[in-house]
Image (cartoon, rainbow, N blue to C red):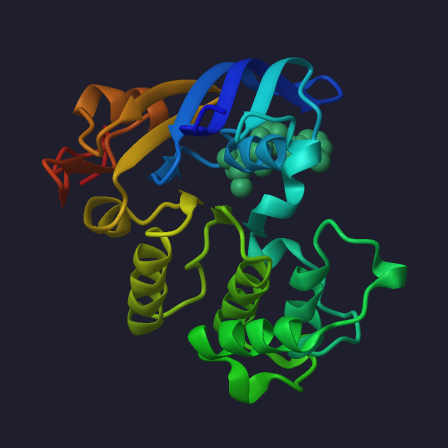
Amino acid sequence: MNEMKQAVCLQNVSAGYGSITALENINLTIKKGSFTGIIGPNGGGKTTLLKIMLGLLEPWSGQVEIFGQNPKYNRRLIGYVPQAAAINRQFPISVRQVVSLGRMAGKLPIFHRYSSVDRDRVKWCLNRLDVLDLAERQIGQLSSGQWQRVLIARALAVEPALLLLDEPISGLDASASTRVYELLQELNQEMTIIMVTHDTLAISAYVRDIACINHRLHYHGEPDISPELVIQLYGCPVELIAHGVPHRVLEKHGGKS
Ligand SMILES: Nc1ncnc2c1ncn2[C@@H]1O[C@H](COP(=O)(O)OP(=O)(O)O)[C@@H](O)[C@H]1O
Ligand SMILES: [Mg+2]
Protein backbone atom coordinates (compact mmCIF):
# COMPACT_ATOMS: atom_id res chain seq x y z
CA MET A 1 0.00 0.00 0.00
CA ASN A 2 1.22 3.51 -0.76
CA GLU A 3 2.11 5.69 2.19
CA MET A 4 -0.35 8.59 2.02
CA LYS A 5 1.63 11.82 1.56
CA GLN A 6 -1.26 14.26 1.38
CA ALA A 7 -3.41 15.34 4.27
CA VAL A 8 -5.74 17.47 2.18
CA CYS A 9 -6.42 17.53 -1.54
CA LEU A 10 -9.00 19.88 -3.01
CA GLN A 11 -9.60 19.85 -6.74
CA ASN A 12 -11.67 22.50 -8.50
CA VAL A 13 -13.76 23.10 -5.40
CA SER A 14 -16.51 25.69 -5.53
CA ALA A 15 -18.89 26.21 -2.62
CA GLY A 16 -21.30 28.65 -1.07
CA TYR A 17 -24.68 29.24 0.47
CA GLY A 18 -27.79 29.77 -1.65
CA SER A 19 -26.91 32.51 -4.10
CA ILE A 20 -23.65 33.42 -2.28
CA THR A 21 -20.46 32.03 -3.78
CA ALA A 22 -17.90 31.70 -1.00
CA LEU A 23 -15.19 29.70 -2.78
CA GLU A 24 -14.42 29.51 -6.45
CA ASN A 25 -12.42 26.80 -8.12
CA ILE A 26 -9.99 26.06 -5.29
CA ASN A 27 -7.08 23.72 -5.98
CA LEU A 28 -5.10 23.11 -2.85
CA THR A 29 -2.90 20.27 -1.68
CA ILE A 30 -1.57 20.21 1.86
CA LYS A 31 1.14 17.74 2.72
CA LYS A 32 1.00 15.46 5.68
CA GLY A 33 2.97 16.99 8.55
CA SER A 34 2.64 20.58 7.38
CA PHE A 35 1.80 23.57 9.55
CA THR A 36 -0.23 25.76 7.24
CA GLY A 37 -1.65 29.20 7.91
CA ILE A 38 -4.76 30.33 6.07
CA ILE A 39 -5.04 34.08 5.72
CA GLY A 40 -7.42 36.40 3.94
CA PRO A 41 -9.95 39.16 4.56
CA ASN A 42 -13.20 38.74 6.50
CA GLY A 43 -15.83 37.05 4.40
CA GLY A 44 -13.13 35.65 2.11
CA GLY A 45 -14.20 32.05 2.63
CA LYS A 46 -11.67 30.79 5.21
CA THR A 47 -14.23 29.22 7.55
CA THR A 48 -16.08 27.78 4.57
CA LEU A 49 -12.85 26.15 3.45
CA LEU A 50 -12.43 24.45 6.85
CA LYS A 51 -16.05 23.26 6.75
CA ILE A 52 -15.41 21.70 3.37
CA MET A 53 -12.35 19.88 4.74
CA LEU A 54 -14.43 18.63 7.67
CA GLY A 55 -17.20 17.40 5.42
CA LEU A 56 -19.65 19.68 7.23
CA LEU A 57 -20.42 21.43 3.96
CA GLU A 58 -20.75 19.71 0.60
CA PRO A 59 -19.06 21.64 -2.20
CA TRP A 60 -21.15 22.63 -5.21
CA SER A 61 -18.55 21.04 -7.41
CA GLY A 62 -15.08 19.55 -7.25
CA GLN A 63 -13.35 16.88 -5.18
CA VAL A 64 -12.33 16.83 -1.53
CA GLU A 65 -10.00 14.24 -0.05
CA ILE A 66 -8.64 13.98 3.47
CA PHE A 67 -5.83 11.44 3.71
CA GLY A 68 -7.02 10.14 0.36
CA GLN A 69 -10.67 9.70 1.32
CA ASN A 70 -13.92 11.58 1.36
CA PRO A 71 -13.97 13.58 4.64
CA LYS A 72 -17.20 11.80 5.63
CA TYR A 73 -15.20 8.62 6.20
CA ASN A 74 -12.25 10.31 7.85
CA ARG A 75 -13.94 12.69 10.23
CA ARG A 76 -12.66 10.81 13.30
CA LEU A 77 -9.14 11.79 12.19
CA ILE A 78 -9.91 15.50 12.30
CA GLY A 79 -9.86 17.80 15.31
CA TYR A 80 -11.72 21.07 14.76
CA VAL A 81 -11.44 24.27 16.75
CA PRO A 82 -14.32 26.47 15.59
CA GLN A 83 -14.35 30.26 15.88
CA ALA A 84 -15.03 30.62 19.60
CA ALA A 85 -17.32 33.62 19.29
CA ALA A 86 -19.57 31.75 16.86
CA ILE A 87 -20.79 29.33 19.53
CA ASN A 88 -23.70 29.84 21.86
CA ARG A 89 -22.54 29.10 25.41
CA GLN A 90 -25.92 29.15 27.15
CA PHE A 91 -26.06 25.36 27.08
CA PRO A 92 -25.64 23.96 30.63
CA ILE A 93 -22.57 21.78 30.29
CA SER A 94 -19.22 21.73 32.09
CA VAL A 95 -15.74 22.19 30.66
CA ARG A 96 -14.93 18.54 31.31
CA GLN A 97 -18.11 17.41 29.52
CA VAL A 98 -17.33 19.54 26.47
CA VAL A 99 -13.79 18.21 26.22
CA SER A 100 -15.04 14.63 26.74
CA LEU A 101 -17.27 15.05 23.69
CA GLY A 102 -14.07 15.02 21.66
CA ARG A 103 -13.72 11.34 22.63
CA MET A 104 -17.01 10.49 20.96
CA ALA A 105 -16.01 11.73 17.51
CA GLY A 106 -17.11 9.17 14.96
CA LYS A 107 -18.63 6.86 17.55
CA LEU A 108 -22.25 6.06 18.33
CA PRO A 109 -23.14 8.25 21.33
CA ILE A 110 -25.82 5.94 22.73
CA PHE A 111 -23.42 3.02 23.04
CA HIS A 112 -20.46 5.05 24.21
CA ARG A 113 -19.12 4.84 27.74
CA TYR A 114 -16.02 6.80 28.59
CA SER A 115 -13.16 4.44 29.41
CA SER A 116 -10.25 5.20 31.70
CA VAL A 117 -8.21 5.87 28.53
CA ASP A 118 -10.81 8.48 27.52
CA ARG A 119 -10.73 10.09 30.96
CA ASP A 120 -6.94 10.18 31.02
CA ARG A 121 -6.80 11.79 27.60
CA VAL A 122 -9.37 14.41 28.60
CA LYS A 123 -7.36 15.23 31.70
CA TRP A 124 -4.16 15.49 29.68
CA CYS A 125 -5.85 17.90 27.24
CA LEU A 126 -7.31 20.06 30.02
CA ASN A 127 -3.91 20.21 31.63
CA ARG A 128 -2.05 21.09 28.42
CA LEU A 129 -4.40 24.01 27.81
CA ASP A 130 -4.19 25.23 31.43
CA VAL A 131 -7.89 24.68 32.09
CA LEU A 132 -7.78 21.64 34.38
CA ASP A 133 -8.75 23.76 37.39
CA LEU A 134 -11.84 24.88 35.44
CA ALA A 135 -12.97 21.34 34.62
CA GLU A 136 -16.24 21.44 36.58
CA ARG A 137 -17.13 25.01 35.62
CA GLN A 138 -20.11 25.67 33.33
CA ILE A 139 -18.95 26.88 29.91
CA GLY A 140 -21.15 29.98 30.18
CA GLN A 141 -18.98 31.13 33.07
CA LEU A 142 -15.64 31.27 31.28
CA SER A 143 -13.75 34.25 29.95
CA SER A 144 -13.33 34.30 26.18
CA GLY A 145 -9.68 33.29 26.49
CA GLN A 146 -10.54 30.33 28.74
CA TRP A 147 -13.32 29.25 26.36
CA GLN A 148 -10.92 29.44 23.45
CA ARG A 149 -8.53 27.07 25.25
CA VAL A 150 -11.36 24.67 26.11
CA LEU A 151 -12.23 24.43 22.41
CA ILE A 152 -8.63 23.56 21.59
CA ALA A 153 -8.61 20.95 24.37
CA ARG A 154 -11.75 19.36 22.94
CA ALA A 155 -10.19 19.12 19.46
CA LEU A 156 -7.09 17.45 20.95
CA ALA A 157 -9.21 14.95 22.85
CA VAL A 158 -10.02 13.46 19.44
CA GLU A 159 -6.32 12.52 19.04
CA PRO A 160 -6.52 13.85 15.51
CA ALA A 161 -4.16 13.30 12.61
CA LEU A 162 -5.33 16.62 11.18
CA LEU A 163 -6.04 19.64 13.37
CA LEU A 164 -8.07 22.52 11.92
CA LEU A 165 -8.16 25.76 13.90
CA ASP A 166 -10.30 28.79 13.07
CA GLU A 167 -8.71 31.93 14.55
CA PRO A 168 -7.57 30.08 17.69
CA ILE A 169 -5.92 32.92 19.56
CA SER A 170 -8.63 35.56 19.41
CA GLY A 171 -9.34 36.55 22.99
CA LEU A 172 -6.00 35.26 24.28
CA ASP A 173 -3.38 37.56 25.72
CA ALA A 174 0.21 37.49 24.48
CA SER A 175 1.51 34.91 26.93
CA ALA A 176 -1.47 32.55 26.48
CA SER A 177 -1.07 32.88 22.68
CA THR A 178 2.59 31.98 22.90
CA ARG A 179 1.75 28.93 25.00
CA VAL A 180 -0.82 27.82 22.45
CA TYR A 181 1.60 28.32 19.55
CA GLU A 182 4.32 26.41 21.34
CA LEU A 183 1.89 23.59 22.01
CA LEU A 184 0.84 23.57 18.34
CA GLN A 185 4.44 23.47 17.24
CA GLU A 186 5.03 20.45 19.46
CA LEU A 187 1.83 18.76 18.28
CA ASN A 188 2.89 19.36 14.69
CA GLN A 189 5.50 16.63 15.12
CA GLU A 190 2.67 14.13 15.19
CA MET A 191 -0.16 15.84 13.30
CA THR A 192 -0.88 18.07 10.33
CA ILE A 193 -2.07 21.51 11.38
CA ILE A 194 -4.09 24.06 9.41
CA MET A 195 -4.81 27.32 11.16
CA VAL A 196 -6.86 30.31 10.05
CA THR A 197 -5.27 33.40 11.53
CA HIS A 198 -4.86 37.14 11.19
CA ASP A 199 -1.79 37.02 13.39
CA THR A 200 1.16 37.83 11.14
CA LEU A 201 3.61 37.25 13.95
CA ALA A 202 2.44 33.66 14.25
CA ILE A 203 2.71 33.25 10.52
CA SER A 204 6.31 34.29 10.45
CA ALA A 205 7.34 32.47 13.61
CA TYR A 206 5.50 29.17 13.51
CA VAL A 207 3.74 28.50 10.23
CA ARG A 208 5.69 26.80 7.45
CA ASP A 209 3.44 27.61 4.52
CA ILE A 210 0.50 29.88 3.91
CA ALA A 211 -2.59 29.82 1.75
CA CYS A 212 -4.18 33.18 0.92
CA ILE A 213 -7.90 32.90 0.34
CA ASN A 214 -10.22 35.56 -0.97
CA HIS A 215 -12.91 33.53 -2.71
CA ARG A 216 -10.13 32.12 -4.84
CA LEU A 217 -6.78 30.75 -3.77
CA HIS A 218 -4.40 33.63 -4.46
CA TYR A 219 -1.25 32.07 -3.15
CA HIS A 220 0.03 28.91 -1.53
CA GLY A 221 3.64 28.59 -0.55
CA GLU A 222 6.28 29.88 1.78
CA PRO A 223 5.23 32.60 4.18
CA ASP A 224 6.84 35.34 2.14
CA ILE A 225 4.30 37.36 0.24
CA SER A 226 4.62 40.40 -1.98
CA PRO A 227 2.99 43.83 -1.49
CA GLU A 228 1.05 43.27 -4.71
CA LEU A 229 -0.47 40.11 -3.31
CA VAL A 230 -1.47 41.79 -0.07
CA ILE A 231 -3.20 44.57 -1.98
CA GLN A 232 -4.92 42.03 -4.18
CA LEU A 233 -6.07 40.14 -1.10
CA TYR A 234 -7.01 42.85 1.34
CA GLY A 235 -7.59 45.80 -0.99
CA CYS A 236 -4.95 47.92 0.73
CA PRO A 237 -1.44 47.41 2.07
CA VAL A 238 -1.89 46.33 5.67
CA GLU A 239 0.82 44.23 7.14
CA LEU A 240 3.35 42.21 5.26
CA ILE A 241 5.39 39.18 5.89
CA ALA A 242 8.76 39.47 4.22
CA HIS A 243 11.54 36.96 4.62
CA GLY A 244 9.94 35.62 7.75
CA VAL A 245 9.91 38.99 9.48
CA PRO A 246 6.62 40.83 9.77
CA HIS A 247 6.69 44.56 9.24
CA ARG A 248 4.15 47.26 8.68
CA VAL A 249 3.98 49.05 5.40
CA LEU A 250 4.19 52.76 5.93
CA GLU A 251 2.17 53.76 2.89
CA LYS A 252 -0.78 55.88 3.90
CA HIS A 253 -4.34 55.39 2.85
CA GLY A 254 -5.44 58.01 0.31
CA GLY A 255 -6.34 61.39 1.83
CA LYS A 256 -5.68 60.44 5.45
CA SER A 257 -2.61 61.15 7.49
N1 LIG B 1 -24.28 29.92 6.87
C1 LIG B 1 -24.15 30.87 5.92
N2 LIG B 1 -25.20 31.26 5.17
C2 LIG B 1 -25.07 32.20 4.21
N3 LIG B 1 -23.92 32.80 3.89
C3 LIG B 1 -22.83 32.46 4.60
C4 LIG B 1 -22.88 31.47 5.64
N4 LIG B 1 -21.63 31.33 6.16
C5 LIG B 1 -20.84 32.19 5.47
N5 LIG B 1 -21.55 32.86 4.53
C6 LIG B 1 -21.01 33.84 3.55
O1 LIG B 1 -19.99 33.18 2.81
C7 LIG B 1 -18.88 34.04 2.60
C8 LIG B 1 -17.61 33.43 3.20
O2 LIG B 1 -17.77 33.37 4.62
P1 LIG B 1 -16.70 32.72 5.59
O3 LIG B 1 -16.26 31.43 5.02
O4 LIG B 1 -17.31 32.70 6.95
O5 LIG B 1 -15.51 33.78 5.52
P2 LIG B 1 -14.28 34.05 6.52
O6 LIG B 1 -14.22 32.91 7.46
O7 LIG B 1 -13.09 34.17 5.63
O8 LIG B 1 -14.57 35.35 7.21
C9 LIG B 1 -19.28 35.38 3.20
O9 LIG B 1 -19.84 36.16 2.19
C10 LIG B 1 -20.33 35.00 4.22
O10 LIG B 1 -21.23 36.06 4.44
MG1 LIG C 1 -14.23 32.83 9.50
Residue drawn 88% across the image and 62% down it: 111
Q: Where does the image place residue 252, in percent across and percent down from the top left?
A: 17, 34
Q: Where does the image place residue 136, in percent across and percent down from the top left?
A: 67, 87
Left or right? Give the position of 142 relative to 38: right
124 versus 157 height, above or below: below
Residue drawn 80% across the image and 70% down it: 113
Total marks shown come to 0
Name of the residue lying farthest toward the right: 110
Q: Nearer the viewer, residue 190 or 136?
A: 190
Name of the residue lying farthest toward the front: 1
Q: Where does the image place residue 114, in percent across and percent down from the top left?
A: 74, 72
Picture quadrant of ligand 1: top right
Say whether residue 2 is visible. yes
Which quadrant, please, contains the C terminus? top left
Q: Nearer the viewer, residue 247 or 177?
A: 177
93 versus 56 height, above or below: below
Q: Quadrant of residue 208?
A: top left
Q: Nearer the viewer, residue 7 or 218?
A: 7
Residue drawn 27% across the image and 51% down it: 202
Q: Nearer the viewer, residue 154 or 17?
A: 154
Q: Where does the image place residue 175, in percent across and percent down from the top left?
A: 29, 73
Residue drawn 63% across the image and 20% down it: 15
49 versus 136 height, above or below: above
Left or right? Give the position of 29 relative to 201: right
Say whether residue 196 is visible. no
